[in-house]
Image (spheres, rainbow, N blue to C red):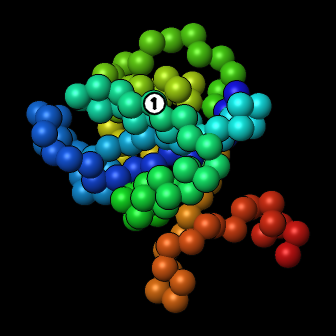
Amino acid sequence: MVREWLVFFADGERFAWWDLFTRPGFRHVLAAGYDAEAERWVIFDPRATGTTILLLDQGEAGAKLAELIEASAGRVLRFAPRACRLFQPVTGGCVGAVSALLGVRGALSPPGLHRQLLRMGATAAFEDSPRHGIHEAESPRSRARS
């Protein structure tokens, strides 16, 4: 079972009518998480053309995660899924599918989901700095110990 998801916000390809209501950097959302029991990474990528679910071992996952981090320009949140999922997603597409995966509701767009996850305690998984480029963000727990 995946205990924490990385939620990637990226541009994605523009080909659906609802792309008119999205903004650059937040046109698509997908998630990746590590299942320690199965020793596999799960990549969950819902698109208008169909959902792709990849199961990758640690070696294969490194390159795929690097590709996702680059495509999202570091707009990645860490989020622990909610235990109770007693609802159907309000929206279709990637936002509704990822919202259902995470056990949250109410978001209608990728930027809306991003804001909602931050309000619910999600933290940035990566940072972009002129000196170091995109790199893993320091966790709030490690900052508190410093």
Q: Quadrant of residue 141?
A: bottom right
Q: Quadrant of residue 49?
A: top left
Question: Measured along the vertical axis of the image, is residue 119 above or below residue 140?
Answer: above
Residue under label 1: 53
Left or right? Give the position of 65 relative to 11: right
Question: Measured along the vertical axis of the image, is residue 23 above or below residue 33?
Answer: below
Q: Residue at x 64, y 49 (%)?
A: 58
- Residue 77 seen from this side: no
Question: Measured along the vertical axis of the image, is residue 134 above or below residue 110?
Answer: below
Left or right? Give the position of 142 relative to 81: right
Kindly identify the amino acid type of the residue bearing the numbered disc 1: Ile
Q: Quadrant of the N terminus?
A: top right
- Residue 135 location in percent, x, y? 57, 72
SS of the residue under disc 1 = strand
- Residue 79 location in percent, x, y? 62, 42
Q: Quadrant of residue 48?
A: top left
- Residue 145 location in percent, x, y? 88, 69
Q: Quadrant of the C terminus?
A: bottom right
Q: Please, which residue is most extreme toward the right here?
A: 145
- Residue 101 location in percent, x, y? 52, 26
**Count of numbered circles in the view:** 1
Looking at the picture, tell me which residue is in the foreground, 117 or 78.
78
Left or right? Give the position of 139 relative to 65: right
- Residue 7 seen from this side: yes
Looking at the picture, tell me which residue is in the foreground, 105 or 139.
139
Question: Measured along the vertical axis of the image, is residue 1 above or below residue 112?
Answer: above
Q: Residue at x 78, y 69 (%)?
A: 143
Looking at the picture, tell me which residue is in the foreground, 142 or 37.
37
Q: Residue at x 56, y 50 (%)?
A: 61
Q: Residue at x 29, y 32 (%)?
A: 47
**Mark 1, other Cα within 10 Å: few <14 / some 14–19 / many ≥20:** few
